[in-house]
């Protein structure tokens, strides 16, 4: 999994392309997003093809060493959104199902993160 650590929601693994789990960046090179929704310096939002239908995804970009240090003590933006969406669903608040969240670290430094 090339340094990627995944959290996958119960009963949703079949929604994810296996090659995405191996290496999200390589998956995106070989399977370009169906639609780019937003791109900025800090995140990219897009729609990807998947076995059970299209999935909304976000890639969070880490901008340098300073930001890498920050994520030694605070959760990544992907992890925060993952946790908030799961809490909202648990409270009965209509929310898109968070399917998976991944972080790639070098040592303890966050390099990249995805939310699906």
Image (spheres, helix red, strand yellow):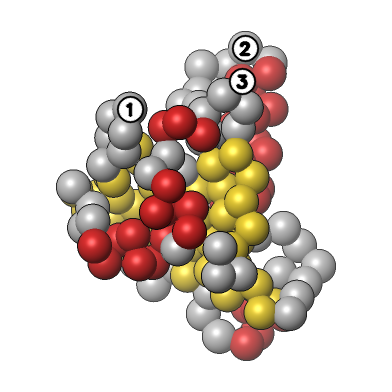
Across and down, in percent, residue 86 comes to: 64, 29
Residue shown at 57% from the left, 54% from the top: 102
Q: Secondary structure at mark 1?
A: loop
**From mark 3 to mark 2, how far is it between C-alphas?**
5 Å
Q: In the displayed structure, would residue 90 be above or below residue 64? A: above
Say which mark, if any, is on residue 89.
3
91 or 57, which is in the foreground?
A: 57
91 or 20, which is in the foreground?
A: 20
Residue shown at 62% from the left, 12% from the top: 92
For this orientation, the residue located farthest to the right is 73
Residue shown at 73% from the left, 79% from the top: 107
In the image, is 27 to the left or to the right of 92? left
Q: In the displayed structure, would residue 49 be above or below residue 60? A: above
Q: Which residue is mark 1?
A: 52
Residue contact at pointers 3 and 2, CB within 8 angstroms = yes
Q: Secondary structure at mark 3?
A: helix
Point out the frontmost of discs 1 and 2: 1
Q: Which residue is mark 2?
A: 92
**From mark 3 to mark 1, how far is it between C-alphas?**
21 Å
Q: Mark 1 vs mark 2: which is more N-terminal?
A: 1
Across and down, in percent, residue 110 comes to: 64, 72
Quadrant containing the N terminus is bottom right
Residue 5: quarter of image: bottom right
Q: How many marks?
A: 3
Point out the frontmost of discs 3 and 1: 1
* Circle 2 residues within 10 Å: few <14, some 14–19, many ≥20: few
Asked whether the viewer can see residue 59, the reply is: no
Across and down, in percent, residue 106 comes to: 66, 79
């Amino acid at each position: 999994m090339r340094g990627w650590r995944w959290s996958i929601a119960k009963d949703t693994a079949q929604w994810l392309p296996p090659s995405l789990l191996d290496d999200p960046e390589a998956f995106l090179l070989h399977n370009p997003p169906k639609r780019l929704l937003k791109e900025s310096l800090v995140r990219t939002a897009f729609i990807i093809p998947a076995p059970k239908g299209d999935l909304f995804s976000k890639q969070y970009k880490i901008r340098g060493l300073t930001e890498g240090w920050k994520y030694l003590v605070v959760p990544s933006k992907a992890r925060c959104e993952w946790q908030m969406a799961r809490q909202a669903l648990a409270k009965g608040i209509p929310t898109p199902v968070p399917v998976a969240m991944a972080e790639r670290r070098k040592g303890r430094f966050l390099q990249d993160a995805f939310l699906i």
